[in-house]
Image (spheres, rainbow, N blue to C red):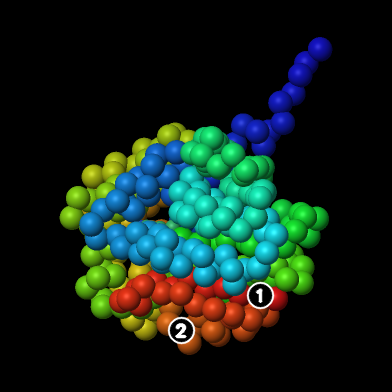
Amino acid sequence: MTVFRKAELLISPIAADVLEGLSEQPKRLPPKLFYDAEGSRLFEEITRTREYYPTRTERAILQDFSGDIVRAAGSNLTLVELGAGSASKTRVLIRAILCRQLRLDFHPVDVSPVALQEAVRSLNGDFPRLHVTPIAADYSRHLPELRSQPGRKLVLFIGSTIGNFEPGEATEFLGRVRASLSTGDALLLGFDMVKDPRVLHDAYNDAAGITQRFNKNVLARINRELGAAFDLDKFRHVAFWSARKSRIEMHLESLADQSVSVPDLSRTFHFTLGERIHTENSYKFTPESIAGLLKQSGLKLEKTWSDPRQWFSVVLARS
Ligand code: AVI
């Protein structure tokens, strides 16, 4: 008997995004392509650089105010974390919740099974009254069914990941999260704030060059997964603050006139000297822009916690 394998299983999941993005003018690649195993590892490394303040600032806010945050969220909580990654900052909230209730169900949701395994591994054993049920899902496309979870839900979308969405996408996504909440449920969001442009610039141009490696890894990933022939030395990392758009933009700039073949797409892409591939936007917020985004998404802002320099905000919202 001849067995046919399904064609889509033979194509890398990044193929369609790469074909579409590199065929556009100007060229672009969606930031979700950063996060293969190597990209996720490099991101963790970025969070430990001296210049990249968002992760440690958000962690400090969660540490300083965990009791207050959990009290504001309410009693008998079930915790859901969208884009859990390794759930490292979540430990602080788990500890605070378990001071107030006997048992906690925690559902980390992430597209990466490796990240979920890491979340379970890092929490296991540390909290005997914690029950972790990971959900592998691309939450940006399909939100898991949250209404059926018992208790009052506290949904976490921290890490300022909302800043990597375009404004329209952010409103649409938060509107879907709102629609999945029941009365009494709450959403906890992390927002990186507008600040001194030098601080912003340095956070995305660290001296050790980790962000540069993270940005270029997207080309290395296309080489690995689609058999492409990108020469990483023929592109340079570019990251700058745009005050007008209130965002850091990341690009990869071609250092030569060059053609790169991508055999698995049966395509060759041409890059002129100085041409850029737009790889990421990281929006920065003000109290006004946060209020506007939540309002447009049908959410009510209940409380905001911040650090002394007001560099980062953690916001509790309800439907
Ligand atoms: C994941 N995200 C919030 C990071 C950010 O700051 O926008 C991704 C990142 N890009 C470069 N450095 C970090």
Q: CA distance from mark 1 to mark 2?
A: 17 Å
- The residue at 55%/62% (across/down) is 157
User: Does any atom of ligand 1 lie closer than 8 Å to the CB of label 1?
Assistant: no
Kind of element beneath mark 2: helix
Image quarter of residue 133: top right
- The residue at 68%/64% (across/down) is 75
Using the rendered image of the protein, determine whether residue 72 is visible from the camera's viewpoint: yes
User: Does any atom of ligand 1 lie closer than 8 Å to the CB of label 2?
Assistant: no
Image quarter of residue 306: bottom left
Q: Nearer the viewer, residue 129 or 168?
A: 129
- The residue at 35%/77% (across/down) is 310
Tell me where residue 155 appears, x and y as whole percent.
63, 61
**Which quarter shows the N terminus?**
top right
Q: Which residue is mark 2?
A: 287
Q: Earlier in the sequence, mark 1 or mark 2?
A: 2
Q: Which residue is mark 1?
A: 318
Q: Residue furthest top?
A: 1
Question: In front: mark 1 or mark 2?
Answer: 1
